[in-house]
Amino acid sequence: MPNPDAGIQVEIVTPESSVTQDAVNSHEPPLNQGFRIPIRNIVIGLCGAILVITLMTLVADARDLASVLSDFNWWLLAPVILLSLWNYALRFIKWEYFLEIVGVEGLPKRESARIFLAGFAMVLTPGKVGEYIKAVYVRRKTGFAADRVASVITAERGTDAIAMAILALIGATQYSYGRGLLAVVVAGAVAVVVMLQRPALFDPVLRWLQRFSFVRASTHHITAFLEASSQLFRVPVLSRAVVISFISWAGECVAFFLILIGLGLKPSAELLLLATFILAVSSLAGGISLLPGGLGVADASVAGMLLLLVNDDALTRSVAVGATLLIRFATLWFAVIIGFVYLFSLEREHTSSTAGKQ
């Protein structure tokens, strides 16, 4: 009897004819084996979000914050949302590109988009590990090995981090804040990329793991993951993906710039540079924290860096908190809402399909 707090048990049933040779070669478990949506982790993430928003409201003074938000030029929310959609569209192009590289076939664009967007709901899991649910959905639709698709999700996360680091480095030429964090991110990214380009480097570790019976059964999954990663982290593929990520996340930085203008700050090239630097560094800090959605860390970083770096009389504590809440809605909560819509859509469809075959 599964623990109800641990998640919802979902049975995966796919016609045997859809199983590709990749799935067979990767020794994946039977396609009728279930997986669990981490409902408990998602609920914890939502509770954490409520706590963070409450604390930020108290810090800013609820009355002042309400006044700041009421004075916001709400017509600017339209281009802000459009820039978020721009980000999602470009990242979907990158997702499709990666799937093609690892050899996924037979997945219609519409279904691929639904899976990609459903992954946004998993941002609320620690370290976004729930996002790997996309690999399960791809396997449901195509029979393609989930361990190889998992490398796509890792490559997505990695290229996003590299792009954000580049955006932050542009601002780091002017501002010293966060340079240590950027150095760690850049060094870590270079190390990971170099290692994943050379799967043979992991051979001694895999041989050592084979000594343990409880790990031995999973080493072939690691091998398949590393083989696919070596394709995705080749320099030409990596370069194209980072360019796509850079352009997509630059749109979110422009969205933050528009939010600051809407709250009364004077538009300037310096403010755009600051908005880019602050959002990029805060996003990286939130990602490194491994907290669901970077809750608390990213929020505090945005508000704190605004107060520390922006030299504008219009920037009060309440304005900084208001800007943080608005940009977090545009970059996090808007995506989470979309993700849940498509996640439940996919699950409802799968439940109906499974019931029809019984």
Image (cartoon, rainbow, N blue to C red):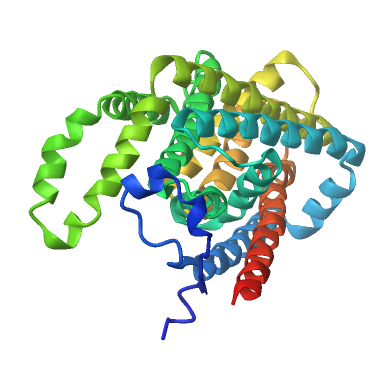
Q: Is residue 183 above or below residue 324?
A: above
Among the 4 quarters of the image, the one containing residue 313: top right
Q: Name the foreground residue: 181 vs 45.
A: 45
Q: Is residue 184 left or right of residue 302?
A: left
Pick the quarter of the image with the N terminus.
bottom left
Q: Is residue 175 visible?
A: no
Residue 131 image point, x, y percent? 51, 50
Q: Residue at x 64, y 55 (%)?
A: 56
Pick the quarter of the image with the C terminus.
bottom right
Q: Name the foreground residue: 28 vs 169.
A: 28
What is the residue that sits farthest to the bottom in this orientation? 1
Residue 263 image point, x, y percent? 82, 36
Q: Is residue 51 above or below residue 130?
A: below
Q: Is residue 357 left or right of residue 15?
A: right
Number of on-image labels: 0
Residue 117 image point, x, y percent? 65, 47
Q: Residue at x 59, y 32 (%)?
A: 96
Q: Is residue 148 visible?
A: yes
Q: Is residue 16 left or right of residue 218?
A: right
Among the 4 quarters of the image, the one containing residue 33: bottom left
Q: Residue at x 67, y 48 (%)?
A: 114
Residue 203 image point, x, y percent? 15, 36
Q: Name the foreground residue: 147 vs 342.
A: 147
Q: Name the foreground residue: 218 vs 52.
A: 218
Q: Residue at x 18, y 30 (%)?
A: 201
